Image: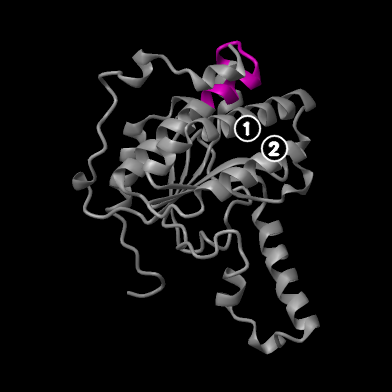
Amino acid sequence: MTVESILSASDAEKTAPSKPVPDPSRFSVLPRHVAVIMDGNGRWAKQRGLSRSEGHIEGAKTFRRIGEYAGDLGIRHLTFYAFSTENWARPEQEVKGIMKLFGAYLDEALERLDENLEKGIRLRFFGDKSRIDPELVALMNKVEDLTKDMTKVNLNIAVNYGAQQEILHAAQLLAAQCTEGSLKPEEITAEKLEANLYTAGQPPVDLLIRPSGEQRISNFLLWQCAYAEFWYSDVLWPDFTERDFDMALSDFEKRSRRFGGV
């Protein structure tokens, strides 16, 4: 199995009879912003005697399926946790495999540009790009620029991302404005801080999905998830299906969201 295999899913995979058709009318309410921690790729591979890199390849296929399905349902904002600031501590070979996989995804995004534009998909990449290979950064910037006018779906991919780092970066930007004299400390508000986060202009997270049996937020969108509903599943990410996503949405519409009220 190779990285390139994520770009060539078989016709059987694409047309499997069990794959549900997106039908937003089945839900009384849909979240505006869904965030997903794509977890369990390595364990999925280990259970099958495969390399961790092969698990990430399967996880990338799932990312594409679920992202497209959610967009077709009418969910306008999607954020996927692809690689954290802490993930650099993983084995070097695994990190290289993930970055190669990410490069393949960027190439695919450019190859499918017309399709993405037709669907109104805007692609954005959240995180500190300073540690990422300059060639990948150039591709990220190109994809962002080519899709910047799309408004139907905001598809955010968090790469070398950490929420604490994001909040710190926003605070540093505000501090710089204070130093320059364009802003007074007492003028700093939650709205001004939000305007300096990667998600500026997007609504807060309504639903956070984490598969694989883990039940923690892992430094992901801490500010944006202040009032998010959490949904956990024991399913490992490569096995996560559209039906699992529907289950999360069905559970979400039953939640009573009071935001501190009664």
- Give the farthest residue toward the left: 25
Q: Is residue 261 above or below residue 79?
A: below
Query: Does 112 sit left or right of 221 as displayed?
Result: left
x, y percentage for residue 15?
Answer: 30, 19
Q: Is residue 87 above or below residue 126?
A: above
Query: Does 123 sit left or right of 184 as displayed?
Result: left
Query: Does 84 sit left or right of 231 as displayed?
Result: right
Q: Nearer the viewer, residue 78 or 222?
A: 78
Q: Residue at x 72, y 63 (%)?
A: 169
The residue labelled by disc 1 is 102
Amino acid type, residue under disc 1 in the picture? Phe
Question: What is the number of the mark on residue 136?
Answer: 2
Q: Which stretch appears magenta? A: 47-59
Asked if marks 2 and 1 touch (Cβ < 8 Å), the reply is: yes
Numbered disc 1: secondary structure = helix
x, y percentage for residue 53?
Answer: 64, 21
